[in-house]
């Protein structure tokens, strides 16, 4: 059982390049989200989705786009990477609507923008 | 907006001893959940323990227990009989418990406490 799979695990980008971080889940969870983790900042929500075709912004959405065409996939796109986007990115999923259920996290993607 | 504060960026504990990690939060809601997550060097986020705000009884999971003080908005984690494998970053997190819209599922995290275990 794969759970939540993020690819790639590591990536180095040049300023201005674009890329997509992939997140796939096989648990049929409606809720999917992206967080970024920076030293001394904890995890902050970038974007989230409550189902296919529905997305919304979190706390730090600038510079990122998302789409949700299927229940399983929730890619995060950086259209023009900036050094400020150097971070570790986590995808997380959860069953709806029970709020007491555990959020499941992927292994994270360490992104460096030079 | 809800905020979560972890005032101890780093802590250390001797193996087999007990350590308490602090967490305070700010919310105007009365019904919510609190969580402690562990992040070892592998980066994996692991749920350690959860507490439902409407329950007065403190949650426990083996060597991990919490001291939940709702009026004081405090949620500390106690690790008993510390083991080398407990060394990790620990995050306190908050989430609303009632589904009042998609945004209510957001987890709000503290900045984390790095725990070192001394052999």
Image (cartoon, coloured by chain):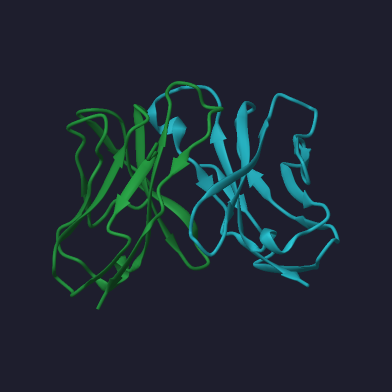
Chain colours: A green, B cyan
Percent position of residue B79, x then y: 78, 52
In the rendered image, the residue lying farthest to the right is B17
Q: Residue at x 54, y 36 (%)?
A: B95
- Taking A16 as reference, is B59 above or below it? above
In the image, taking residue B26 as reference, residue B2 lies left or right, namely left
- Taking B82 as reference, is A14 above or below it? below
Q: Nearer the viewer, residue A68 or A59?
A: A68
Percent position of residue B84, x then y: 71, 64
The quadrant holding residue A112 is: bottom left
Percent position of residue A58, x then y: 36, 44
Q: Nearer the viewer, residue B28 or B97?
A: B97
Quadrant position of the N terminus of chain A in the picture: top left
Q: Residue at x 75, y 34 (%)?
A: B59
Quadrant position of the C terminus of chain A in the picture: bottom left
In the image, taking residue B29 as reference, residue A35 lies left or right, namely left
Q: Nearer the viewer, residue A6 or A43?
A: A6
Percent position of residue A72, x then y: 26, 33
In the image, taking residue B7 as reference, residue B17 lies left or right, namely right
- Taking B80 as reference, is B11 above or below it? below
Q: Residue at x 20, y 66 (%)?
A: A81
Q: Residue at x 45, y 22 (%)?
A: B100
Q: Is residue A52 visible?
A: yes
In the rendered image, the residue lying farthest to the bottom is A114
Count of residue discs: 0
Q: Is residue B7 visible?
A: no
């Amino acid at each position: 059982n794969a759970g939540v799979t993020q690819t790639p695990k590591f990536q180095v980008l040049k300023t201005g390049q674009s890329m997509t971080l992939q997140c796939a889940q096989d648990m049929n969870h409606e809720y999917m989200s992206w967080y970024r983790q920076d030293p001394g900042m904890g995890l902050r929500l970038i974007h989230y989705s409550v189902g296919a075709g529905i997305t919304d912004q979190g706390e730090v959405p600038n510079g990122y786009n998302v789409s949700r065409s299927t229940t399983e996939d929730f890619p995060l796109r950086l259209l023009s990477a900036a050094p400020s986007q150097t971070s570790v990115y986590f995808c997380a999923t959860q069953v709806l609507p029970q709020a007491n259920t555990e959020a499941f996290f992927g292994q994270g993607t360490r992104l460096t923008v030079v | 907006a809800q905020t979560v504060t972890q005032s101890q960026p780093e802590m250390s504990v001797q193996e087999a001893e007990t350590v308490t990690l602090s967490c305070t939060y700010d919310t105007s809601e009365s019904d919510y959940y609190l969580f402690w997550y562990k992040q070892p060097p592998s980066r994996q986020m692991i749920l350690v323990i959860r507490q439902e705000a409407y329950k007065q009884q403190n949650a426990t999971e083996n060597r991990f227990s919490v001291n939940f003080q709702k009026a004081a908005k405090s949620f500390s984690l106690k690790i008993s009989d510390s083991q080398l494998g407990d060394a990790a970053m620990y995050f306190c997190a908050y989430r609303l418990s009632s589904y009042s819209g998609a945004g209510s599922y957001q987890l709000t995290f503290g900045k984390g406490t790095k725990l070192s275990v001394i052999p």
